[in-house]
Image: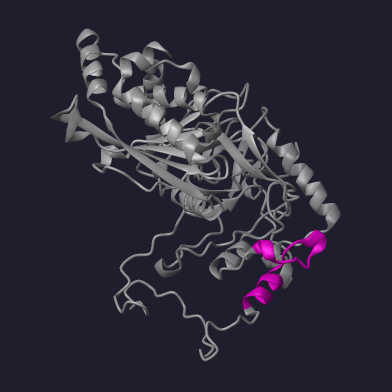
Amino acid sequence: MSSELQVFRLPDLGEGLTEAELVNWLVAVGDQIKVDQPIAEVETAKSMVEVPSPYAGTVAELHGQAGETLDVGKPLISIAPVGAAPAEPKAPAATDDAVSTGVVTDAEASAAAETYRTEEKAGSGNVLIGYGTPGGATAGRTRPRKGSVAVVDAAPAPAAAAEVPVAPMEPAVAGTRIPGKLSAVISPLVRKMARDHGVSLDAINGSGASGLIMRRDVEAAISAPEAPATPSAPAQAAAPAAALGDLDGRTGLAVSARTPVRGVRKAVAANMTKSRTEIPEATVWVDVDATALLDMRAELKKRSPHDTPGLLAFIARFVTAGLKKYPALNTRFETGTDGSQEIVGFDGINLGFAAQTDRGLVVPSVRNAHQLSARELDAEIRRLTAVAREGKATPTELGSGTFTLNNYGVFGVDGSAAIINYPEVAMLGVGRIIDKPWVVNGELAVRKVTELTLAFDHRVCDGETAAGFLRYVADCIENPGAALADM
């Protein structure tokens, strides 16, 4: 039997994700593993998932340490075939550019890329993040405690340098650009260098083969002269980031903590920035008397105390009905590579809802929500909230929404200037329901009042459409019996 190592690369995560943070190894060097056995926990920008192995054999090398961010296509684990002794990993070539960027020829890159695509389908079948592979082993496993796994070729890093990834020695198949999956950069170190110095890789023309971006290209961009803020401002070198305990140059205060932006928080930051940058949003709002809706639900609860839908489910039902009447708010605005623009409509509604979790704010979506009753919507909202808080929601469940409903009233606030969940074009927010003075039939009364706030993309519709939708949902809340009778 061949003793050649089988190198399993981090698989394509789908949904446009190109990297994941290695949270915890579930195996150690020397362990015997089976096909489909989970080998590592990784956190993507959308969920925490386990990665199953497509190979059986002996763990020869673990490529990475807990806390390290790995690019899709980068080696994750090397496995020696069953009965073969683990092979020693090969060091990359000792040239400067080869070490920093993993330069390979076009032929080698094409061959290695094909190897990667083959490896994704190797072993028992398709290797998908968060799922087993068809027909794989079903034997149980013993999960090691965190921190108990030995990592090959990785010495403990000092606290002050904890954010700097240590590049482990990799087999010769490492460092290949995966066409269609990564930008024209091979080395994670080159990516980190660009991020640390605020250099956009999109603005760099790579000097390597096939336009690959080399370390020297990033260094040239870093050293390029910049125009001073003012003509009289003296040129100054960028001050290094203050370490913990050092005084911050701007505030004069001691630095107490530095928290890397990763996982869900990193995805939220990127998504919100893109939304604010690209979408010319506008906001409309209205106060709504929700007394009748609360009374109707209380009556239903008396009749059926165990399966009465929550208020959010009823509002979700009104929202889906409103989107049928005003479909412009259930679209996506797209700009083509040639500059052409179009509004994409959908035959159906995937209703997203904001859910706060320990990992940050996520937006799972109820697929085909327009086909569900209030009771069915309630059940699906509860299920998705539970899996999202456990970190087990799939990329599809977290990335397929067409409109978002945000119940920020649970945080005790009345309204919010919400940021639209890109690439959607609208979001409806619901504030807290509180007692307020309200005029009913010419008489002043105390009613249960909430505020609805609609943020919308002004490119896809005008204020008349947005106001019409908002007023429709408000009317449904104020007269729920009549509204549900027509749905």
On the question of residue 149 being in view, the answer is no
Q: Residue at x 42, y 27 (%)?
A: 319
With 318 as the anchor, is 71 left or right in this view?
right
Give above or below for 34 relative to 198: above
Q: Which residue is situated farthest in the front direction here?
A: 442
Residue 204 within the magenta-colored segment of the rendering: yes
Q: Quadrant of the N terminus?
A: top right
426 or 302: which is nearer to us? 426
484 or 168: which is nearer to us? 484
Q: Residue 28 placed where, x, y %?
A: 51, 45
Q: Residue at x 43, y 40 (%)?
A: 362
Q: Which residues are magenta?
A: 201-222
Residue 376 within the magenta-colored segment of the rendering: no
Q: Which residue is situated farthest in the right direction here?
A: 107
263 or 165: which is nearer to us? 263
Q: Chief secondary structure of the magenta span? A: helix
| Marker count (numbered) | 0
With 72 as the anchor, is 431 left or right in this view?
left
Give above or below for 183 relative to 343: below
On the question of residue 146 being in view, the answer is yes
Give above or below for 377 relative to 411: above
Q: Residue 259 placed where, x, y %?
A: 39, 60
